[in-house]
Amino acid sequence: MSRIKQAFATLKDQGKKALIPYITAGDPQKDATVPMMHALVEAGADIIELGVPFSDPMADGPTIQLACERALAHNTSLHDVLGMVVEFRQTNTTTPVVLMGYLNPVERMGYETFAAAAVEAGVDGVLLVDLPPEEAVDVAEFFRARDLDMIYLIAPTTTDARIEAIGKAGSGYVYYVSLKGVTGSATLDVADVARNLQRIRQHVSIPVGVGFGISNGETAAAVGNVCDGVIVGSAIINLIAANAAQPDAARHAVAGLVGSMRRALDA
């Protein structure tokens, strides 16, 4: 059983929902990433989404765009990101790690080479925003051969037919984008999320995580009532940016936010 599948199974047995924080690797410095990953786990994270810095993160709003810029200013590469996972795995062999980003760096490395290197490093899943399932057939073969979960996005505007195709192609979990817009958007309608998740679950058998618009314990708990996992990114990145020159302060601030979300989800 993959680490992602095991994590969701354990949480289901405990009557809990997954807390899935996102950080951008290399932001604000390369050596801050692995300590932040450990801090996320200590604060209650069940799965970590680790962003691969990219120069044109088209699905992301200004917050994560700036995080990518800060990481790229330190020349953080895909090789560096894999190295961070290797370092993380030296002391944590259980928390799933999902690489989230865009196709170009993976394509440049080569799909087969990347899949092998990712699994060797300890990566459990990959979410490539601009690689839809219709175009991922060849890539999926390399990933499946390595038991690397392919995670896809579902939007409020996704048709039933396409949701069904994503449900068949994806593994680990699907990422439901709760808002029409980019990351960091502010307005979240939980009732609308619940209605859409009812529709999604008619076609998708794997867990559904919800992201975009979740910024505090209150919204995390509300969304957690209707999904399998809560994904939070921009709220964390804002705290990192506010403490960019003080890694200890950044970890403390982020741990406080993630801990409050964990408590709210478990209440």
Image (cartoon, grey):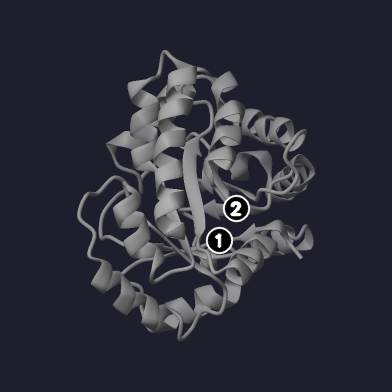
Q: Secondary structure at mark 1?
A: loop
Q: Give me the residue at 61% from left, 45% from top.
A: 107
Q: Which mark is residue 151?
A: 1
Q: Quadrant of residue 65?
A: top left
The Cα atoms of the two marked residues, 2 and 1, are separated by 6 Å
Q: Give the answer, above or below, for where 147 lies relative to 38.
A: below
Q: Is residue 221 above or below residue 31?
A: below
Foreground: 58 or 94? 94
Name the secondary structure under disc 2.
strand
Inspect the image, locate mark 2, and give the three-letter code of the amino acid beneath it: Val
**Residue 261 in picture, x, y percent from top left:** 41, 49
Q: Earlier in the sequence, mark 2 or mark 1?
A: 2
Q: Residue at x 52, y 52 (%)?
A: 128
Q: Residue furthest top?
A: 245
Rate crowding at label 1 as few (under 14), some (14 to 19) or many (20 or more) other CA atoms within 10 Å.
Answer: many
Q: Residue 244 location in percent, x, y?
A: 40, 19
Q: Is label 2 in contact with label 1 (beta carbons under 8 Å)?
A: yes
Task: For residue 83, say whether it is visible.
Answer: yes
What percent of the width, then of the height, locates residue 146? 78, 57
Give the residue at x 32% y 35%. Answer: 63
Along the line of sight, the residue nearer the viewer: 41 or 194 = 41
Does residue 73 appear in this view? Answer: no
Graded by Cα atoms within 10 Å as few (under 14), some (14 to 19) or many (20 or more), the crowding at tag 2 reads many
Q: Which residue is mark 2?
A: 126
Amino acid type at mark 1? Ile
Work out which quarter of the rendered image holds the N terminus and state it: bottom right
